[in-house]
Image (cartoon, rainbow, N blue to C red):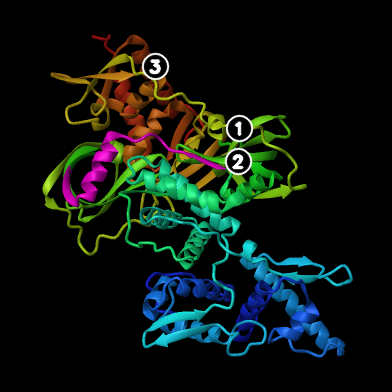
Amino acid sequence: MSRTRTERLVNLVICLLSTRRFLTAAQIAATVPGYEHDPEDPRDHDAFQRKFERDKAELRELGVPLETGLASAFDTEHGYRIAHREYALPDIPLEPDEAAAVGIAARLWQHAGLAAAASSGLAKLRAAGIEVDPQATLGVEPVVTVDPAFGPLTAAARARRAVTFSYRVPEVDEPTVRRLQPWGVVCWQGKWYVVGHDRDRDATRCFRLSRIVGTVRAVGQSAAFTPPQDVDLIGQVAHFSGPVAKDQRATVVVRPGRAAGLRRWAIETVPGPGGDRLTIPYSDSEWLASRLVGYGADVRADSPPELRDLVIQQLKEVVTRYQPAAAGVLS
Amino acid sequence: MTPPQQRTPVSRPTGGDRLGRLLNLVPYLLARPGIEVAEAAADFHVSVQQLREDLELLWVCGLPGYGPGDLIDMALDGDRVTITYDAGIDRPLRLNPDEALALVVALRMLAETPGIGSRDAIERALAKIENATGDLGDAPVAVRLPAGTERLDAIRDIVERHHAMRITYYTAARDETSSRIVDPMRVLMVGNRGYLEAWCRRAEATRLFRVDRIDAYEELDEPAAPPERAVPHDMSDGVFQPSADLPLVTVRVGRGSRWITEYYPCEEVRRDGDEWLVTMRVTDLGWAQRLLLGLGSDVTVLGPPELVAQIRGQAEAALDQYATPAP
């Protein structure tokens, strides 16, 4: 943007902030420097109108609330003004420790678009006279990342507009098109989900943002639905109920100096001639069997028998699968 | 436009950036009479030269009439500036929806982070920002991170006291536990996991240590002294960024183990009949053996050949151990 255009736009903002009456384009042209033209000359007038349209778009892009309306009942042409109350950031009386927290929060975004939005928001707070200590830290800093679908989904949830997107779960190859009335977006255990009413399933559904393929499209009108009163977004996603009690005990023999990962879980370690005998608390036999098999010949599961059988079963399947006789398995 | 001498890198300014900056600049200066031009320039991440050009531009802007009493006026006293007439731009613009969302969600994230200090200040700040942004602050975003752990709190305290630590750390890639002395730099939360970022004196490099794999730790009576060359990790692409010199593993994966393609970064995932051909880079073939052998017959390793041989050999040897009845 040229200096003259920037200057014209600053003057336009000041002019529209200072007026209570709506000013028509012609009145603005006669007032604000940079819009001088001959209204009788069609080409000159056209050029002015294009310039004025671009300028209005620029201000709206920046978030300047341009109001349009008629100056009086006798006017036929719409005019413009900016209400100071709508324009101005309200007073935010932040204490120094609160301002420091906002400053830290603004640095957390790893997503380029939201990082830029956070720092321009912070610049406005600074402009309102708030001092932000750039050196402040809080000891622990969350790394805040979001999936690309985050922006469109939060915008749609706020506008209460339906969305459509392609969704792919790992077990199925082809993405399917889903139609959703989004109620909100949730960060649960470090992953992002959108919760809402699935219009095809006619039920409440959660979708993981990282599984959305391509773009999220908003469809239909704004304010098209109302989320249920006091909907518990996190409750919709958090269907796991805390850690499971590890009340079973496995006995496992590991070779000396091997399987450090298993040793960390052991509540007892007894050295023996064939290796160290570990006692490992667990809750899910299949899960533990899978871990034990991963260690191959470094580990032998001794008890309980069902764990031992699971390990043997899985090892047999693997051996069979890799036998040269299993034609076509290996390339 | 003069290239700004920036303290922090920002994207190349566009016209809209300058207009936004000018509209911020007037109330900013109004709130700080007599501020040094250099300080203001630093706050706006522009050069002193650029800030002076901004001031010159504002000087010729003002209310209709554009006479001496209408234009924005300021007193420049050497290196200091004071706005004496603001022509009505006495406040910055309100936050737009993206700005409100970015600040509110980051504050909610911060408030949920386990082991964080000043939680009270964060929650007060959040309430004030939400209040000032009205409907925009009522972001349809909820955040819940795992509850704090004593270990994370304790490690954070050591980081804040700037002391070196001796840690016993389990390295999953090599399946070994080792003791090392580290110079802590910061504690991070990535997703639901806590990490200690520190200079590792043994590796002579900056390392990220998963807090749940620090099996023991001891605060040392010496200051944390990460060397100049200890650079924090760029976290924008996640914690694990596989590099091209790591071994490439190719596997055939059935439906039941397809989740690994979502859990671990993969180079390629291709449909092959009822299964998928997956290639991924791994830091260590031993780690790949523990993962892939553990997945059982739902996964077949196709390469590299040494991994195929290792998995086949290990499965056979492991099975031989059970040839004799259980003791």
B241 vs B278: above or below: below
Number of other residues with Cα within 10 Å of mark 2, as a class: few under 14, some 14 to 19, many 20 or more: many
The span shown in magenta is B141-166
Mark 2 vs mark 3: in front: 2
Q: Which chain carries label 2?
A: A
* Residue that appears at 42% across and 82% down: B81
Mark 2 vs mark 1: in front: 1
Q: Is residue B85 visible?
A: yes
* Residue that appears at 61% across and 38% down: A173
Using the image, tell me which numbered label, if any, was put on residue B244.
none
| Separation of residues labelled 2 and 1 (CA atoms) | 9 Å
Are discs 2 and 3 less than 8 Å apart at CB? no
**Percent x, y for residue A154?**
61, 47
Q: Quadrant of residue B148?
A: top left
The residue that label 1 is drawn on is A231
Q: Which of marks 2 and 1 is nearer the N terminus?
A: 2
Q: In which quarter of the image is residue A197?
A: top right
| Separation of residues labelled 2 and 3 (CA atoms) | 43 Å
In the rendered view of the protein, which quadrant contains the C terminus of chain B? top left
B140 vs B58: above or below: above
Give the camera-side residue of B49 and B248.
Answer: B49
**Percent x, y for residue B3?**
45, 82
Q: Tell me the kind of residue under disc 2.
A: Gly
The residue that label 3 is drawn on is A310
